[in-house]
Amino acid sequence: MRAQSETTEAGFTLIELLVVIVILGILSAIVVFSVRGINDKGQGSACKTDKSTIQTAEEALFANSGKYGSMQQLVDGGFLSSASAWYDATSAAPNATYEITPKNPSPCT
């Protein structure tokens, strides 16, 4: 009689397995929705870094030649390794200021 009761209690019931599957499904849904916003934050950080790099290159060009330049002048002068895909740099007036504007379409605002 004892051996018969031990064999009937071994394993999981169908209800227990379904409860575990539902709990795992809920936890995975929570993770998916919480991770969704991480990509947007990364894109914002990349935009800020790209703009900051262009600003630093403009200041380095001004310190070197006494004038601000365009994006192509920054690349040709060796102050940037390549032109930005998200921003464009222009010189407003000779030796006056520079302006960094987002290109269209751009993920940066």
Image (spheres, rainbow, N blue to C red):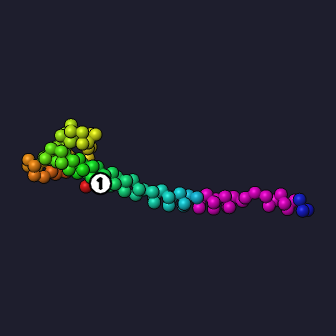
Instruction: Name the residue rendered at 61%, 57% in the picture.
Output: 21
In the displayed image of the protein, which residue is found farthest to the top?
Answer: 76
Q: How many marks?
A: 1
> Taking 2 as reference, is 69 left or right?
left
For mark 1, give the secondary structure: helix
* Magenta portion: prevailing SS class: helix
Magenta region: which residues?
4-23
Instruction: Name the residue rendered at 81%, 59% in the picture.
Output: 8
Instruction: Name the residue rendered at 59%, 61% in the picture.
Output: 23
Query: Mark 1: which amino acid?
Result: Lys
Residue 76 vs residue 18, the one in the foreground: 76
Instruction: Name the residue rendered at 16%, 48% in the picture.
Output: 62
Q: Work out whether residue 105 can be spotted.
A: no
Q: Position of residue 16 (x, y in %)?
A: 68, 61
In the rendered image, residue 104 lying in the magenta stretch gets the answer: no
In the rendered image, residue 14 lying in the magenta stretch gets the answer: yes
Residue 30 vs residue 79, the one in the foreground: 79
